[in-house]
Image: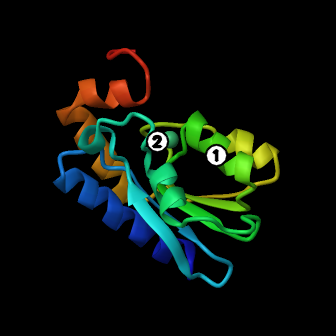
Amino acid sequence: MDPQQMLAVAVEEARAGLAEGGIPVGAALFGPDGELLGRGHNRRVQDGDPSMHAETAAFRAAGRLRGYARTTMVTTLSPCWYCSGLVRQFGIGEVVIGESRTFTGGHDWLARHGVRITLLDDQECIRLMTDFIAAHPDLWYEDIGEPPGR
Ligand SMILES: [Zn+2]
């Protein structure tokens, strides 16, 4: 699987989240042979759970694994500090990111700690977030823990 193919799964998740009235961020965890281990999307709104980010949802959906060094987390948006911490905590070896124009989390920090980072600058991901932030600025700034109009 190439990065763009993996990203397509995360985009499907983001769109599913949007269709549920949620924040359109999706993610998936893949194994070393490109096998899909888990997938999920941000469910802050749906579950009333501010800790249910897309990467966390995908990670939890994958269940217990013996090691994460050869896994790849793909996410539609640069991972926030919380999800970057998850990547580092469990030693996930690679992160593929749809875009970091609308939000930049901890991916440079991850790169400095040896995580392979692929940033795709994907137009569909940028459009999903740009449209969502314009339509629901309050929800978005709640999600990233910043006041509106920063
Ligand atoms: Zn996050």
Q: Nearer the viewer, residue 82 or 79?
A: 82
The local crowd at label 2, few if under 14, some if 14 to 19, many if 20 or more residues have their Cα within 10 Å, is: some
Residue ID at (75%, 66%) = 67
| Residue placed under numbered mark 1 in the picture | 86
Q: Earlier in the sequence, mark 1 or mark 2?
A: 1
Q: Position of residue 8 (x, y in %)?
A: 40, 71
Give the left or right position of residue 64, taking residue 120 as reference: right
| Residue placed under numbered mark 2 in the picture | 101
Residue ID at (18%, 46%) = 21
Q: Nearer the viewer, residue 70 or 46?
A: 46
Q: Position of residue 94 (x, y in %)?
A: 69, 62
Secondary element under disc 1, as helix, strand or loop, is helix
Specify whether residue 120 is in view.
no
Where, quadrant-wise, is the N terminus in this rendering? Answer: bottom right
Secondary element under disc 2, as helix, strand or loop, is loop
Residue ID at (42%, 43%) = 52
Give the left or right position of residue 32, taking residue 22 as reference: right
The yes-or-no answer for disc 1 within 8 Å of ligand 1 is: yes
Mark 1: amino acid: Leu
